Amino acid sequence: MLVLVLVSVVALLAGALYLFLERRYSTWKRKGVPGPKASVLAFNVPKVMLGQENMGDVTDRIYNEYRDSPLAGTYMFGSPLLHLHDTEIIKHVLIKEFQDFNGRGIGASVSNAAVDPLATHLFFQSGQPWKTLRVKLAPAFTSGKIKYMFETIRECSYQLSDYLDERIAANGGSHCEDSRTLMMRLFVDTIASVVFGIESNVVKNPESAFFTAAQEAVKPNLTNALRSLLAFFARRFMEAFSIRSTSPATTKFFLDVVSDTVDYRENNKVERPDLLSLLIQLKNRGFVDPDKADGKVAEQGQPGDKKLTMNEVAANVFVFFIAGFESSSGTSSFTLYELAKQPELLKKVQQEVDQVLADFDGKLTYDAIMSMPYLEMCINETLRKYPPLAFITREAMVTRKVPLTEVTVEKGTRVVVPVRALHYDPLYWPDPEKYDPERHTAEKKATRPAVTFMPFGEGPRMCIAARLGVVQIKTALVRLLSKYTVTVSKDEPDKVRMNPKSFATTSDMPLNITFHPRKAAAGIQKRRQSVVSG
Ligand code: HEM
């Protein structure tokens, strides 16, 4: 009898859950938004759950299947996701009506810092907490601050070429290495140094604890893939089961390094015009000093300014560190790889680099790297083919109609902008698989809607450090291409295999490049200068 009751209760509960999910999964149908039918158990993304496809791949697929519809609807862990396909709607959501869509739609455990200490950072925040933090951190990335950082950025690129020179000498004339890992080492050093004043020395010593921590944090394995997926789309589940968005090892490393560095700076009265010093001011006072470097007056303290906790300082250090080295190492290594595969493009870039450096008396200066339009077009073409984030998200902060439509979205609905799919739409980018820097001339650019090229996102929430990213990538490429010619083996596949377990755009194969010293071009090999022009 008891068994019968139990079976009946379980059957009733299962039936109720089934009906609830059936109703949930008909949200978009009821609103007249097309989309794939979600199976009750596997949501829309069974392959994502198995690590065979990532959310970027799903977003591309939905875009290609529902290309002609301005909107498409899917589900993730029971929540409806709205995919925007129409470029005018995208503009409204990201720019014109941003105030109603300013959330990232993630949240992980932002509200539960005790459980997930590294989740309380700028990238995950929404609403007023995001706005306040963004305004206070933006002064760290003005052009004045980046010019100030330039000498360090350049010094890191010299250390990389010193390392390559040593390897080339040891290997008898050339050196082959996975450029992705090589550039990761460079940018871990650069970001650690310019943003936090820490010398991580990863180029010289890949065994450094910093590099281990960096690799651990972005390793494209199933655990990290599931953590990112849950952090993005299943905040309640994470909170309910106290799941962190970062592994225990990563969490401990960043909490320890940041608290030691902050203690050192405070005890020794060390002041540097970098991001960490802004974060320390926010921890101690809740507001930052005026931005003297750019001659502007930044925000002064307001009554009730919230002070950051040490964990919040560490969380922001963490996100700047990861965002700072991952995107730049991917972009620079894909650029080297694509140029090595097309020697005629490589030659054209090297001619520009040689000419501009000769014009600048052989000095690798900030102004010199800013005078290389063809190099910039190559970097843009890499960012089109391999945008570090295949999609970006926003969250409806109020219940309202989707701009330019009659479809109502409830407060909290996640909105997906398919960045990579737009970058590959043949309507805007003919023959999209082809790597062709000429697509980025001013004339060609004027023929496309702006949001069809968004590697840094768009609107008030676009990448806060885009300028720094471009400067560090250009500096590294100029140093490398002025000194070396790069080649790839003929056996390399035509198309780079991408990693289905990685949330960011990451190759699933080494990007092996061989570096050959170039015959010295006039005036380009001078090693160190201390003056930053411009
Ligand atoms: C090639 C270089 C880079 C690319 C392509 C890139 C791309 C992006 C993208 C697509 C976003 C989301 C924007 C949106 O939602 O509209 C973003 C946000 C962000 N990026 Fe970057 N990024 C780069 C370099 C950097 C660097 C060097 C740093 C830090 C040192 C950085 C820190 C951040 C942060 C903190 C955010 C969150 C901004 C917010 O939510 O307010 N990024 N980035």
Image (cartoon, helix red, strand yellow):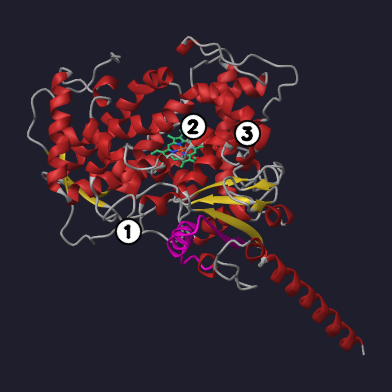
Viewer-nearest of discs 1 and 2: 2
Please state the horizontal and vertical placement of residue 233, each as a whole percent of the image: 61, 55
Viewer-nearest of discs 1 and 3: 3
Please state the horizontal and vertical placement of residue 500, each as a whole percent of the image: 43, 61
Please state the horizontal and vertical placement of residue 284, each as a whole percent of the image: 67, 20
Kind of residue at disc 1 = Met
Label 3 sits on residue: 130
116 to 426, vertically: above or below: above
Label 2 sits on residue: 464
Residue 95 inside the magenta-drawn segment: no
Q: Earlier in the sequence, mark 1 or mark 2?
A: 2
Taking the spot 28% from the left edge, 56% from the top edge, the residue there is 433
SS type, badge 2: loop
Q: Is residue 129 left or right of residue 9?
A: left
Taking the spot 44% from the left edge, 59% from the top edge, the residue there is 60
Residue 72 inside the magenta-drawn segment: yes
